[in-house]
Image: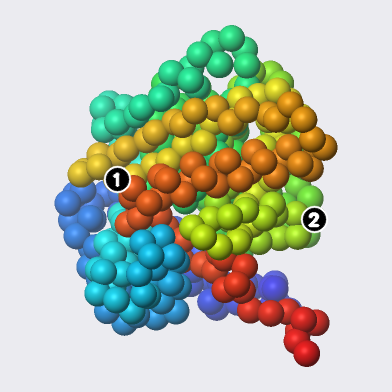
Amino acid sequence: MNRPDGRLPVADRIVAASYAAGWVVVRRLPERLAGWIFQSIADVMWRRQGKAVRRLESNLARVVGADAGSTEVRELSRAGLRSYFRYWAEAFRLPSMSRERILGGTHASGEQAIFDNLARGHGVVLALPHMGNWDVAGAWLVHKGHPFTTVAERLKPESLFERFLAYRQSLGMEVLPLTGKGGGSGMAFGTLAQRLRAGRAVCLPADRDLTASGVEVDFFGARTRMAPGPALLALQTGAALLPATLWFEGSDWGLRIHEEIPVPEEGTRRDKVAVMTQQMASVFEKGIAEHPEDWHMLQRLWLDDLEPRPADAS
């Protein structure tokens, strides 16, 4: 909320200024120096073991089946935090990366499924977890000749959200706000459906949706909710639902496009969405298990990790 004089709170101004400085300064640094700076920040944060690091370790413990305080998970969380901060270093530098660097450095498999569908005028929904560098993957798809549409959660302050919007648009992406300025529906679903019916691609992060509309799935042996949007869009428009997983591969990037998730022939609309979302979760589970250090989940995810609402307290 703004102050009575119309100015943003100090904390919001600091956040906005920090990101603005990042986009201006980091892209001008030599790549190795920027990488070293961000890795050093990650290591300091890891040693302090604050709330975000402890949450990352709790999440990774479920992935590898170990205790959150074990040496294995502690080492994995350090690698995970370095991966997360590498994402941010690259995000700040991405507008200055050449087309050749992005295309040559992205090692993709299964990508022909995207190109074949789009060549036939058939829309594609790419659903992905928060892994690796999804912005680089998006820039790769654009450089391959396929601009796409995605959604972004509205950030605070508004100036920060607008900067993120301009940044991703500069990479060739069409970005729709997930909600309107007042927090209501931003009508994103309808626009996404239009793009798919026009034979275009849509990319959606889908490994976390703890709202009431999220679909419950089994994920690493426990229940969570994931976004219904990818399955709903595929069901409503006939687009191909293709899960994708991403990771860092040395100084480059790995990307795998998995097999299409089909629409079930039987069942209600809700049943079909539930089945497709569970299949999507199972693909994510496999990809994350193969590259757990590159899964950037520093928030609560599983339902039994959530704090009970006041109304639930007895």
Q: Amino acid at mark 2?
A: Gly
Which numbered disc covers residue 184?
A: 2
Numbered marks: total: 2
The local secondary structure at tag 2 comes to loop
Determine the residue positioned at 39% across, 80% down: 50
- Residue at image x 50%, y 13%? 116
Q: Is residue 293 above or below residue 103?
A: below
Separation of marks 1 and 2 at Cα, in angstroms? 36 Å
Three-letter amino acid code at the position of disc 1: Phe
Percent x, y of residue 277: 63, 43
Q: Nearer the viewer, residue 241 or 178?
A: 241
Lateral position of residue 294 relative to residue 79, left or right: right
Q: Does the image show residue 257?
A: yes
Mark 1, residues whose alpha carbon is within 10 Å: few (<14), some, or many (≥20)? many
Q: Residue furthest top?
A: 120
Compared to residue 123, the image places residue 156 above or below, namely below
**Where the C terminus falls, by quadrant?**
bottom right
The residue beneath circle 1 is 248
Residue at 62% from the left image edge and 68% from the top image edge: 303
x then y, percent, for residue 37: 23, 63
The spot of residue 292 in percent (x, y) is 35, 55
| Relative image position of residue 264 (x, y in whole percent) | 70, 30
* SS type, badge 1: strand
Q: Could you tell me which quadrant the N terminus lies in?
A: bottom right
Of residues 54 and 281, the one drawn nearer to the viewer in this rendering: 281
Tell whether label 2 touches label 1 (CB within 8 Å). Answer: no
Q: Is residue 92 visible?
A: no
- Going from the N terminus, do you reach mark 1 or mark 2 first? 2
